[in-house]
Amino acid sequence: MSKPKVSSDWLAGCAGCHMSLLDMDERILQVLELAELRSTPITDFKEPDVTGVDVGVLEGGISNTYNEEVAHKMRSRCKTLVALGDCAVFGGIPAMRNFFTIEEALRRAYVETPSTDESGKIPSDPELAVPTKVRALSEIVPVDVFVPGCPPDADVIFYVLSELAQGRKPELKDELLHWH
Amino acid sequence: MVNITIDGKQVSVPEGTTVLRAAENAGVVIPTLCDHKELAPYGGCRLCLVEVEGARTLQPSCTLPVTPNMVIHTATDKVKEARKFVLSLIFSERNHFCMFCQVSGGDCELQNSAYAEGMTHWPLQPNYTPFTVDASHPYFVIDNNRCILCRRCVRACGELIGNFTLGIEERGANSYLVADLGGPIGESTCVSCGTCVQVCPTGAIIDRQSAYNGREKDTTKVKTICTRCSIGCGMEVLTRDNRVVRIDGDWEASINHGLLCSIGRFEPLINDKERIPTALVAGTNGQKASTLDGAVKEAVSLIQTAEPAAALITDNASLEELSLFSQLFGGNSKVKTGVLGGNGFLQMEENVTFTSESSLSAVTNCDVVILIGADLAANHQVAGFMVKRQLPTGSKMIMLSDAKNGFSANADAVLDTSKGLELALKELIHGIKDESASPAKYLVNAKSVGIIVGETAGSGDFSVQSGLIKDLSETLVKSGKATYILSLKGGANGSALRQFGLNHSMDLNGVKTVILFQGEDTVDQKMIQKLNSIPNLVVIGSYNSNLAARAKVVIPASTWWETSGTYMNIEKKLQESQLITRSTDDIISMQDTLSIFGKHLGIELNADWQKRLISTTGRS
C-alpha cells in the first residue's frame, strides 16, 4: 500500500502553525515514514496534486476571495480536511477586524498607521483579491478535523498527523485540547 | 430529608436543597457558569441542565429543588448535547476568542467548560457586534465583549456587598453591564471591593495589576489573613517570582467568607511608598547608614541617657511583637508605653467588659443594627458590607454618628453625636422605654438587635459612655430582644492590646525620647504634632516619612507579607499571617528588631507569647 499523501497551505494566518509543525523536530521523520508530504507553502510544490491527496491541512482564516479559492481547491482535492490552529478553526486574530468595517480596517492599515505618509493609498488593483469579513474555514468548506490552538503544540500536530497517516480520525481531548 | 437518585447513586438531602448541591454532595460534577456558592441560585447560563425522569424537558439543576424519589441523570447523550449547544450559543454571542484574552489558559471557567466537553470548535460563528469597554476604574477593567451575562458580578455587588452599583442595561443579546445609571464605573458608587473581579468566570472583569502577568497556574497561592484592621479577613495571595500578583478573598474563611475591601485587595498592590532600605543613625552631618545592631545600640543609649522615654507600637503588630514589646518596655518605670493608633475606644474597652461579645455574623444578621461611632465606609468595610446587604431584606440601621460619617447615607435613622455621644445614647435609651420616639420606633417590632461599637466612640468620657452602652444593651434585653454586641477593635491586633496591658492612654509631655515601632502604619496629624516636639526620635518603620527623616535612629521594618505572625481577629480567634515574599537582608521584622533591643537592654526575652494571653476564643 502506498503512503497517504499530505498537502498543506496557509491562508489568513501568521505561519505560526507551520512553525509549530516544524517544532516537532526529528519526529517529522517519523511522520514522513508514514506519509508522503506533497505540497506545502515552505517546500517547492505549492498546490495539492490534481489527482488528489489523502489529507489536506489548512492554516489561517478566510479573509479574502483568494483565500476562498485556495480553500475550495484544497477541499476538492483532499479526502480529509484539517483546520489547523485557531484562525482556521474560529477566525482567530484576523477576525478582530470584524468588529470594524472593511473600509475602516483598510484605512487603518494603509493610511492611518504611524509608518504611512500622507500619500498612503488603499490598493485598488482589479487583480487583487477582494477583502471580506474574516471567517472560519468551516464557514466556506466542510472541515473534517478541527485542531485548535494558537498555535497547536508540536505534540498535538504530531498526534493528529500520525493518527491520520494511519487511517484513524484523531480525537483531541484533555491535555491535547487547548485553544490558547 | 428527601431521598433522590443521581446517576444511580442514592442520596438523602434536606428539603429545599437544589439538585446541583445534592449532586455535589454525591460527588457528581455538573458544570456551571452562573452558579456561585456564595450567591443565590440564578439559572442564567443553562449549562447545568440535567435530565429528570418524568420531566418533559431538561431542567436547570441549580434552581431545581429536590422532590421525593426524584431520579436524575447528569451524563446522558441528551444532556451532553444540550451542554455543547449552550456553550456554542454563549461562544457565538460575543468576542470569546481565547487567543487574545487575558484569562485564557486555565483561568477562564468558560474555556474550561468547553475543554471539559471536548469542544474543538464552535458550530456557530459570532456576529461581531462591538460592546463597550469601561477602563475608567483604577483597579479593574470591564470588557462587555467578554461578558456571558451570568450576572455573578451584579448579584455579588447586591447580595454580598449590598452596594447595588452594577446592573444590566438593555435586554436579550443587547444586554450589557453598567454601573449605576450607565456612567463610567470609575465615577460610580462603586466601593472598589473587587468582589465582581473575583467572581467573574471569564475575562469580562479583569484586575489591572495581575492582567498579563502570567497565568494563574504559574503562580504560587498562599492562604493568609489581612492585617489592615481588626476583622482579620482570610485571603489568598498569588505570587510569582517573589512578587505579589493578586489578592483574592478566601471563600473558606469563617470571618469574611471571601469578601475583602479595597484596602485588603487592591491597595497593597499599588503601594508606591518609598521603602526604608537600610538602618540609619543621625550624626553631625545628617543620617548615615548603619548596621542594624549599631542602630539599635544607639537607640538604647538614647533611652538610657535622654530620660524620660516612651515606646509606642502600632496596633497592627503581631502578637509575637506585642509580647516582646511589653516585656521590653512594660516593666520599665522610666519608659512609658503606648499604642500608635490607640484611641479613646481602647480605654473604653477597658471599662466596658463586653463579656457577651458576639460573632460578626450574629451582630450583622439582626432585624436592627445600631452603629455607635463607627464609620464602616472608611474602616472595617467588610463589616459594613455585611450590615448593608441585610438592609434590602427589611433590616433597619440606626447610627449614632457625627456628620462626617460616610456610612450614614445607608442609615434609616441617624442620631447626631456632635454634642456628645452620651446625649445620643440617652436619647436612644429613652426612646426605647417610651416605645414611640424616633428612631427607637424601628426597635419596637425587632426581635433581634445588633450593636456595633466603633472606634470613634470613646472620644468623650469613656466610663459614662461605656455605662450607657451597657444600659442600652440591658434595656433591649429587658424588652425581650435578642441582643448581640461587638466592638470594632481598631488595628489588626486591637483585640489583644488589652491583654498585654497596652490599652491605656499615654501622655507625651516632658518625654525626651520616643521609640516608635511604626511598621507599615501611618501616623495621624495629631500624633505627628505631638512627636514633632520630641527631641530624640527612633523610628522602626517600612516607609520613609517626615518623621523618619528627622529621626535620630531609623531601622527598616518588613511589611506584613515579608514576615509571619499571629493575630487575634475581631472575634478574638487566633489566626496566622504567612510569609509571602522575602525582603532584602537589610530589612528585618519588628520581631527581630525587638530581640536585638532585648540584647542591648540586657533583658531576657521569653518568646512564648501564648502564656501571656489572658483569653482567646480559640483558633480560626
Image: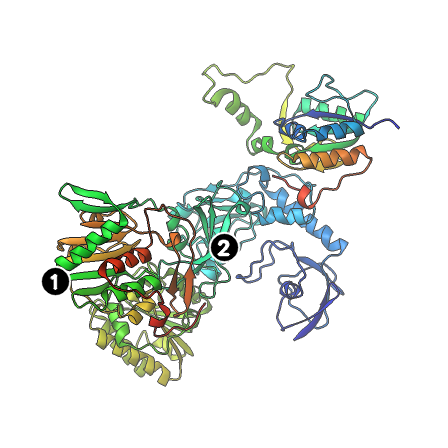
Q: Amino acid at mark 1?
A: Asn
Chain on which label 2 sits: B
Q: How is the image coloured?
A: rainbow
The crowding category of the residue bearing disc 1, from other C-alpha atoms within 10 Å (few below 14, some 14 to 19, many at least 20), is few
Residue occupying the point 38% across, 67% down: B570
Q: Residue most toward the right?
A: A1
* SS at mark 1 in the image: loop
Residue B279 percent coordinates (x, y): 26, 47
In the displayed structure image, the side of residue B568 where residue B308 appears, left or right: left
Q: Name the quadrant containing residue B385.
A: bottom left
Residue plotted at (54% across, 26% down): A105
The answer for which chain carries disc 1 is B
- SS type, badge 2: helix
For label 2, the residue is: B154
Q: Which mark is residue B509?
A: 1
Image depth: mark 1 or mark 2 in front: 1
Up-down relation of residue A52 to residue B78 (above or below): above
